Every structure is written in structure tokens, then in C-alpha cells.
Image (cartoon, grey):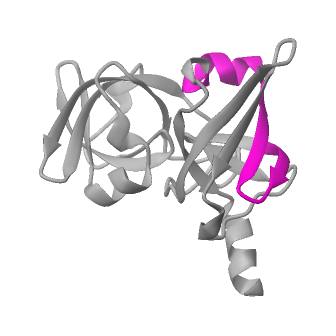
Amino acid sequence: MFTGIIEALGKVLVVVEEGGNKTFTVECSFIEALKVDQSLAHNGVCLTVTGFRPEGYIVTAVAETLRKSNLGKIVAGDLVNLERCMLMNGRIDGHIVQGHVDLTGECTSIKEENGSWLMEFTYDKSAGHVTVPQGSITINGVSLTVASSHPGKFSVAIIPFTFEHTNFKTMKVGDIVNLEFDIIGKYVKAYMQ
């Protein structure tokens, strides 16, 4: 369980294909605090730390994860948003994030607005996911508030701190992002059906 508040950017150092899976070696600022079998969100995808190398820790994404997320497109040198699992005795600063990506979306617009950024994203509406204005959405693991919402399309406003401390600062129109829709909204939708 996560909150969508990014702790650090990790740099992917090595990507190794192993059958249908990919193993990543990642460098980060809090490596000393990690241990084997720990959950860690990478661009919003919950992966398990499986080992360490002198230069970083190791995680593996299986074929299903690669198919549903943007991790299959990650190459050495890319930056990923990192968040350790939440502590149950603290504040939840973002919203409840499972680390289970629902699908990918595409960045279709980035507009600087005098110190903030308005970003628009599209996604496959046939999957039945919905957003609502002022509701929660997780993009690449970042907990954000929906600014505008339409079927298969929404926008978010990015504050300078989030822009500078996540991989939003390297995002371009056409980039593929991981989307996790609000868990409460998913349960309400399922119940109403």
C-alpha cells in the first residue's frame, strides 16, 4: 500500500531480459534502508526488492506487469519515481494507492501556466475506468488531483515541487504513463453495476 507521495527519483542502471520478464538494477538515495522482500513502487508499480549489487538494488517485472505498465519501455539511464510502502502509523499525505497499474495512458498536452503545468492525458475508455473533477488519480506513482475530466481524457495541474522532484520534469507529449484509478471510485462503480 502506498500514498502516491514520491520519495525520490531512481536511476535505472541495468535492464536485463529474462524470458518474458525484465530485471532492473536501480540506484537511489535510500538504498541503505532497503531490504530483500520489501515492496517499492516504481512509476506506481509495486515491485519486490530481490537483491543488491554494489551500484544498486534489483527488482523484476514479470510479463503481465510489463504489458500493463510503461516499465517494458524503460531503458538504462531512465528516471523512475520511487516510493516505499506506507507506514500504518503515519499520515496519508496523498491517497490510497495500491501499486497496481490499471492501464497506461498517453500525455497529449503540456502547458506551462506561469509557474505550474497543466498536463492532459488520454486512456482507453473501453476499459470502463472513470475520473471525476477534484478526484484522485495516480500517474507514474504520483498522487494527483483531477482538474478536468471527460470520457477517456483528463487533466491535472502540477505544482513546481512535484514537477522538480518527479519524472514529470522529463515528460514530453506522446510519453506513455502508468495510471492507477482511485480505488474507492472503482469499488463504487463496481457496486453500482
Location of residue 124 by image quarter: bottom right
Whether 120 is drawn above or below 132: the answer is above
Q: Nearer the viewer, residue 160 or 111?
A: 111
Whether 112 is drawn above or below 39: the answer is above
- At x 17% / y 19%, what residue is drawn? 54
Q: Nearer the viewer, residue 78 or 85?
A: 78
- At x 62% / y 53%, what residue is drawn? 123
Q: Quadrant of the C terminus?
A: bottom right
| Drawn side of residue 44 relative to residue 107, left or right | left
Residue 53, position as x, y percentages in the image? 16, 26
| Drawn side of residue 38 relative to residue 55, left or right | right
- At x 62% / y 50%, what residue is drawn? 89
Residue 145, position as x, y percentages in the image? 79, 43
> Can you see residue 120?
yes
Residue 17, position as x, y percentages in the image? 16, 41
Q: Is residue 124 magenta?
A: no
> Can you see residue 88?
no
Whether 161 is drawn above or below 181: the answer is above
Residue 167, position as x, y percentages in the image? 54, 24
| Drawn side of residue 125 relative to residue 148, left or right | left
Location of residue 161 by image quarter: top right
Q: Which residues are drawn in magenta?
A: 145-168
Q: Residue most toward the top? A: 114
